[in-house]
Image (cartoon, coloured by chain):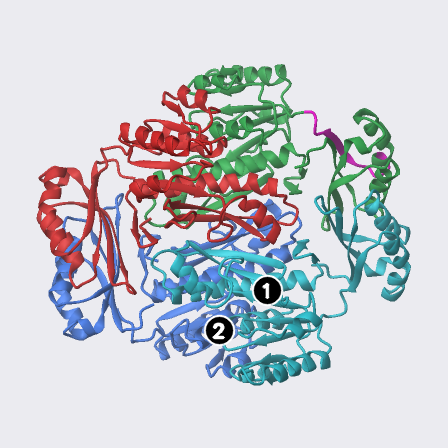
Chain colours: A red, B green, C cyan, D blue
Amino acid sequence: MHRDRFYTLSASCPDQVGIIARVTGFIAEHKGWILESSFHADDLDGRYFMRIEVKAKSLPFHLAEFRERFRPVAESLQMDWRISDSAVKKRVVILVSKQEHCLYDLLARWQSKELDIEIPCVISNHDSFKGFVEWHGIPFHHVPVNPENKLAAYAEVQRLFDEVRGDTMVLARYMQILSPELCRDYPGQIINIHHSFLPSFVGAKPYHQAYARGVKLIGATCHYVTKELDQGPIIEQDVIRIDHSDSPEDMVRYGKDIEKTVLARGLRYHLEDRVLTHGNKTVVFR
Amino acid sequence: MHRDRFYTLSASCPDQVGIIARVTGFIAEHKGWILESSFHADDLDGRYFMRIEVKAKSLPFHLAEFRERFRPVAESLQMDWRISDSAVKKRVVILVSKQEHCLYDLLARWQSKELDIEIPCVISNHDSFKGFVEWHGIPFHHVPVNPENKLAAYAEVQRLFDEVRGDTMVLARYMQILSPELCRDYPGQIINIHHSFLPSFVGAKPYHQAYARGVKLIGATCHYVTKELDQGPIIEQDVIRIDHSDSPEDMVRYGKDIEKTVLARGLRYHLEDRVLTHGNKTVVFR
Amino acid sequence: MHRDRFYTLSASCPDQVGIIARVTGFIAEHKGWILESSFHADDLDGRYFMRIEVKAKSLPFHLAEFRERFRPVAESLQMDWRISDSAVKKRVVILVSKQEHCLYDLLARWQSKELDIEIPCVISNHDSFKGFVEWHGIPFHHVPVNPENKLAAYAEVQRLFDEVRGDTMVLARYMQILSPELCRDYPGQIINIHHSFLPSFVGAKPYHQAYARGVKLIGATCHYVTKELDQGPIIEQDVIRIDHSDSPEDMVRYGKDIEKTVLARGLRYHLEDRVLTHGNKTVVFR
Amino acid sequence: MHRDRFYTLSASCPDQVGIIARVTGFIAEHKGWILESSFHADDLDGRYFMRIEVKAKSLPFHLAEFRERFRPVAESLQMDWRISDSAVKKRVVILVSKQEHCLYDLLARWQSKELDIEIPCVISNHDSFKGFVEWHGIPFHHVPVNPENKLAAYAEVQRLFDEVRGDTMVLARYMQILSPELCRDYPGQIINIHHSFLPSFVGAKPYHQAYARGVKLIGATCHYVTKELDQGPIIEQDVIRIDHSDSPEDMVRYGKDIEKTVLARGLRYHLEDRVLTHGNKTVVFR
């Protein structure tokens, strides 16, 4: 956490000699003060990843000019890249069903500015949390989903997300499978928390599957949503110990504690541009 | 978690031959169905601990008679004992200051009945959470504390706790040191969450102490409050990994995640009569 | 750990009223001093599990008579049961291939009597560790396994195990799949360590599978061997954190640290009669 | 782990604009291929830390010339710096007393080349492990230590360490307190494993202290040895869960598992030049 405004450059490119020198040379040339920097070479694929935070006021130009001047460097390195500004809050839309733990957890972090984001709205297929969300001054949209109206429902979710210019959609134990269209149109923008240590126990009722198999730890996985259910790039995971005395209901209860923590950690990494995807995997610069 | 009503016997006594047989023999004689049972012998001190859940409807009598009939058994074994009824919700008073994480976490668990308790009121030395608490339909009492009014303030806290017939007082990051009188009058009833892995870093600003020492893990400790600050019997602890890149502010943020989890776990153990104290230590039958 | 000799009763039976009373009543009647006791009711299956340690010298009879006298109690409760004697060391045969970590770890624990067992021999399909094992005074048998001689090789393993009157066979990263006959003839006696967090990544090269999927934790699983590969009852599991910078080779290295620890823990539970199997699951009284 | 030979530059210097650009610019200028790089700015102290691995054969010169040519860059940045060569094995002298777990663990890692080091000798104040060590082809020196001969004994340890040109001295549960002279003469070269989660439970019998305090986790700490006992810079720590049923002897046994793991991790970080000390703290580039 840095108090001063900063820009974050996240990028990947084919690996070659001199990448760091080129990029940090450009920044140094403009007297940019680097607050934090991370680099990673994927040896097997020959791809290079980086994330650099530069103090905004150390640079002689603003974001638009930073981007413009950096473009030739990026192009010469064949980079996929983006630069974000810590002063521009990310706009996070939360989707929730009837379970409270992730929603309370995210709103607590938002309320205290631990998560320094905008939450332009919460969308739910139930109206259970309408009062709670609205009490926080956040608009709440009840978009029921049933077998008949799925297409229309997801079109409405998409409309609401676009209308509020959302950056990220968080499925905070949203117990519905998004449409392939939504998954396709917002790659790397939709984050889910799955209540198992993937790839174990994909699909429904993972805690019951875990109980049946007799595992000694249960887990949770925060991942990007793709059209392959529970198969998207994994951002963060964690586990918690259980034993023979725990029923599936106990596991559900234990699981909540890791689900909310893993979701919050994964979301933070994403919002701070610490996550670079690479095929079906992620580089996470913690 | 058992759906059926049950009674919980928690007891300790000097160790000797035949304790379990005596106690479970008494229960079996009345056709009591044991749902869960735990026993522990402290070899060094020669003391025996137990916790037994009996299905209420399997017994031919109600709680009062259970207690009355069990008394001679307990007395012959020189027991410290109690029997609680799962149908009687514990009454938990929460004390909070300006940090939100434990309060949100506890109210989320209460709202979903994961913690099946009554919260007759929340008391705070600030009024930050008045609206939030009252939105949940829980009375909120603002009892300011300052160097001049401490005695009166704690008398007021005590009066409120007594007035609502509280069973347990939870210091959910309540940043005040309770009066020795309160600590003395409610032994084993006041639970605190300390933001360090005790006995490391007692007192103020433990995360800054941890930063200065360069530790690689930080922790949180849930303990009973006694008049010796940060010295009471430990109920639960946990830690989280940090590294050189984490500032004291980052540690505060990481720490919140274990503080709320450790507090919730410790409180649950306490409320389910899983914690038996023994000098300055606890037996926790998980 | 108790210094005095003790007997361990492990049993399971259909659940009913009065089981603990019957069993502990029997023990108390003979002035048996209970050192440790654990009970578990499996609500879903209506089965009851227990493990009780009784100080040997507190009883007026020896093991054989203990068993004989307890038999009627056990039969009336339809128990599966066994009583073991802490003074009789279990005989553990270790099978190993070319990886050293589990072998060194087990021999270190044996050498210091942390694992108070007999190791009548070590069997390997390679001769790499012949000198190391023999230096410890333990016979080493090189039984090569190849596609042609499998039947004969496993017959030889079985002959050696029987010859030394082995109680338990430990596959300490033995990179061969045992014959169905071996698995069938020694149910609950063969323990394997699998280098993944089962049920994730069954079969070969689990670390490479984990790398390909981009998981953030890798694990190890100690389980009983059954004829279904990697499907036997799980005794113990653990995980360790990795990240994008770890190659499959790094994971192999990290994995060794949990493999040996998880195997040693699982083996200890087994040897101390803390593991009761129940269909494809285990009750582990730690 | 990189199969190709590489040089590792570890350095720290006062923070300023352009450090990374200067250093990586120098490397790029000579077509140096960076395999791995890590940077850290300590905001509070204004100090900058880095570690860079460069593929040896990508550079047009050898180590000596690399150092010579880099010197002006380093001096202009007022760096503390060193460059090591992955082809030159570190020489690690192990000191041990009567506990076997860390010794077996280190020799297993050395035997399999997981730790790719030279162990020129093992020194002990007992002769328990003479045979075991010598069987591995490693010289063993028995240097008894008693209240009368301490000065002479440590002089002998120092002589042996110097004679074999040791780089690092590892106290693998060496139950003696080194002389202030040794601590002073080899700063950052002597690594100890302390059997507690420092700063809790300094001094003798930490597991007994932990038992008396009733903590719910016990730990181990790998640190550089300084003349202040148990106060040196911490390299690595970890903990393991215990409960009320664990005696101090059980804790000793559990503790061994984390002691050896934490020591091995800390030693690896040190040997790979991943640890930079900074006052009484460390930067560890994992």
Q: Chain of mark 1?
A: C
Q: Pointer 1: what residue?
A: C264
Numbered label attached to residue A109: none
Residues rendered magenta in the picture? B75-88
Residue A151 in percent (x, y) is at 38, 34
User: Per the image, is B80 magenta?
Assistant: yes
Q: Which image quarter: residue B29?
A: top right
On screen, D206 above or below C172?
Answer: above
Residue D99 in percent (x, y) is at 56, 68
Q: Pointer 2: what residue?
A: D108
Residue A6 in percent (x, y) is at 21, 39
Distance from disc 2 to disc 1, alpha carbons, whole Å, reads 16 Å
Judged from the image, the secondary structure of the residue bearing numbered disc 1 is helix
Residue D218 in percent (x, y) is at 54, 51
User: Per the image, is C261 magenta?
Assistant: no
Q: Chain of mark 2?
A: D
Task: Say whether residue D104 is left or right of residue D110.
Answer: right
Residue B202 can be seen, yes or no: no
Task: Say whether residue B212 is left or right of residue D100.
Answer: left
Q: What residue appears at the point 64 percent right and 63 percent down from the top-left corner?
A: C268
Task: Say few, some or many: other residues with alpha carbon within 10 Å of mark 2 (under 14 / 14 to 19 / 20 or more).
Answer: many
Task: Report the amino acid beneath label 1.
Answer: Ala
